[in-house]
């Protein structure tokens, strides 16, 4: 027994010594560069300048990010309906399942970003939503079958996973909150299936919403060329750190016009963690319809300098109705957080866990009132 304990002690001592050496000399080799509560992620924790071209150009940033961007091929299986007996159980008993089924639409539909060395890949919901089979092609030429862990139509994000031997290259997360209009960015993906492509542009705008693309919108707008096939690819800063997942373009003909939109990396990260942990995303809900205050409404309600949102609908039997909120109230704050727009209200409420008690401050008939509400669970949205 003493001999085994001595061997164990020596092994632990050697392991700790190696860990100390790596931590001191090569800390980037450790997954602790950032460790998510769900999977191992790599995050940039330094204050690297991301608003100018480095002295050696953008090749270093491209080389850093390109190995983590993959091409996604999907196929759907459509059964022939020509035989009227094809679904008859007696037919299946004698002849088995029909053989006249085959993959359809087997094509390169989009891109994805490896976010963890364990094989988790972020992409768009619309890239994989109708897929029966998914194949991923890595930048190094390897291919692997993938399966969907879960998806979130309201942010147009999905997580898929591949299983390959060894550690996979993973993107380093940047902080889109530090991004500024004019910052240089690279868009990496597989447009039109021609192969991995890098385009350069700048951040054209931040927190774009009211586009009608997703329920939750706070897009990074860029003029880096994004074309069909880029969906789900990476938008990275000049240091090669991920700041967004390319999602959509504004174009009447399907080509790039210099108006592309990416989902911020922090939104993608929080959504991804919920999907991996629970298979879906759970959001808070209160059951309100609102309208932002216009100068005309402010004057009509004699609100003065008050900021908030006008309650235009209270859903029956919702947490809002049970709390006593009425149409015509003006919502000022939730748990002391100022509500100045519908987007702020939506993001604030959806960020609360169900069953949480929150304090609401409202104006009713020119008088300030306070109410308590219990956050509900946001109903699942169905895709059309």
Image (spheres, rainbow, N blue to C red):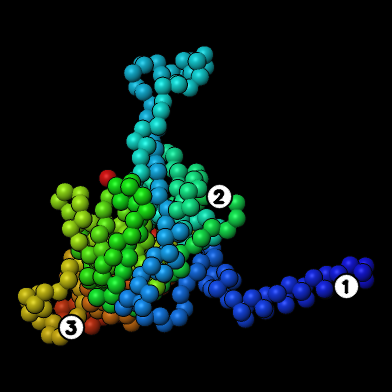
Residue 163 badge: 2
Quadrant of the snapshot with the C terminus:
top left
The x, y position of residue 247, in whole percent, is 30, 57
The x, y position of residue 141, in whole percent, is 48, 48
Q: At numbered mark 2, what does the secondary structure look like: helix, strand or loop?
A: loop
Marks 3 and 1 close (CB-CB < 8 Å): no
Q: At numbered mark 1, what does the secondary structure look like: helix, strand or loop?
A: helix
Q: Callout 3: 10 Å neighbours few (<14), some, many (20+)?
A: few
- Of label 2 and label 3, which has the lower sequence position? 2
Q: Is residue 83 left or right of residue 12?
A: left
Marks 2 and 3 close (CB-CB < 8 Å): no
**107 w.r.t. 101: above or below:** below
The mark tally for this picture is: 3
Extreme residue toward the bottom, this view: 305
Q: Quadrant of residue 79?
A: top left
Residue highlighted by disc 1: 6
Mark-to-mark CA distance, 1 and 2: 37 Å
Extreme residue toward the front, this view: 56
Residue highlighted by disc 3: 306
Q: Nearer the viewer, residue 205 or 29?
A: 29
Evaluate whether residue 285 shows in this view.
Answer: no
Please tell me which residue is depicted at 11% across the width and 74% down the height of the picture.
294
Foreground tag (3 vs 1): 1
Q: Is residue 200 left or right of residue 292?
A: right
The x, y position of residue 98, in whole percent, is 45, 21
């Amino acid at each position: 027994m003493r001999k085994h304990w001595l061997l164990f002690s020596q092994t632990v001592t050697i392991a700790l010594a190696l860990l100390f050496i790596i931590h001191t000399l090569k800390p980037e080799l450790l997954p602790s560069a950032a460790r998510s509560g769900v999977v191992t992620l790599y995050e940039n924790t330094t204050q690297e300048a991301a608003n100018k071209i480095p002295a050696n150009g953008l090749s270093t940033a491209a080389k850093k990010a390109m190995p983590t961007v993959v091409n996604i091929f999907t196929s759907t299986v459509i059964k022939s309906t020509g035989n009227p007996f094809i679904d008859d159980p007696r037919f299946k008993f004698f002849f088995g399942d029909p053989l006249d089924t085959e993959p359809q639409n087997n094509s390169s539909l989009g891109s994805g970003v490896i976010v963890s060395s364990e094989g988790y890949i972020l992409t768009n919901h619309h890239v994989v939503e109708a897929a029966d089979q998914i194949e991923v092609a890595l930048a190094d030429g390897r291919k692997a079958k993938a399966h969907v862990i879960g998806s979130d139509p309201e942010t147009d994000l999905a997580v898929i996973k591949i299983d390959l031997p060894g550690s996979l290259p993973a993107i380093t997360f940047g902080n889109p909150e530090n991004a500024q209009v004019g910052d240089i960015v690279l868009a990496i993906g597989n447009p039109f299936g021609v192969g991995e492509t890098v385009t350069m542009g700048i951040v054209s705008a931040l927190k774009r919403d009211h586009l009608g693309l997703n329920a939750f919108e706070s897009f990074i707008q860029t003029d880096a060329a994004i074309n069909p096939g880029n969906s789900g690819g990476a938008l990275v800063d000049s240091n090669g750190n991920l700041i967004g997942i390319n999602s959509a373009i504004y174009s009447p003909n399907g080509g790039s016009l210099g108006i592309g939109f990416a989902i911020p990396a922090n939104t993608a990260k929080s959504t991804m963690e919920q999907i991996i942990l629970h298979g879906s995303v759970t959001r808070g809900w209160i059951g309100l319809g609102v309208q932002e205050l216009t100068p005309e409404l402010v004057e009509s309600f004699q609100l003065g300098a008050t900021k908030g949102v006008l309650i235009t609908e209270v859903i029956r039997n919702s947490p809002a109705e049970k709390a006593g909120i009425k149409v015509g109230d003006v919502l000022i704050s939730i748990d002391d957080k100022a509500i100045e727009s519908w987007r702020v209200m939506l993001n604030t409420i959806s960020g609360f866990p169900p069953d949480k008690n929150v304090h609401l401050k409202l104006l009713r008939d020119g008088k300030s009132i306070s109410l308590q509400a219990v956050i509900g669970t946001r109903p699942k949205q169905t895709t059309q």
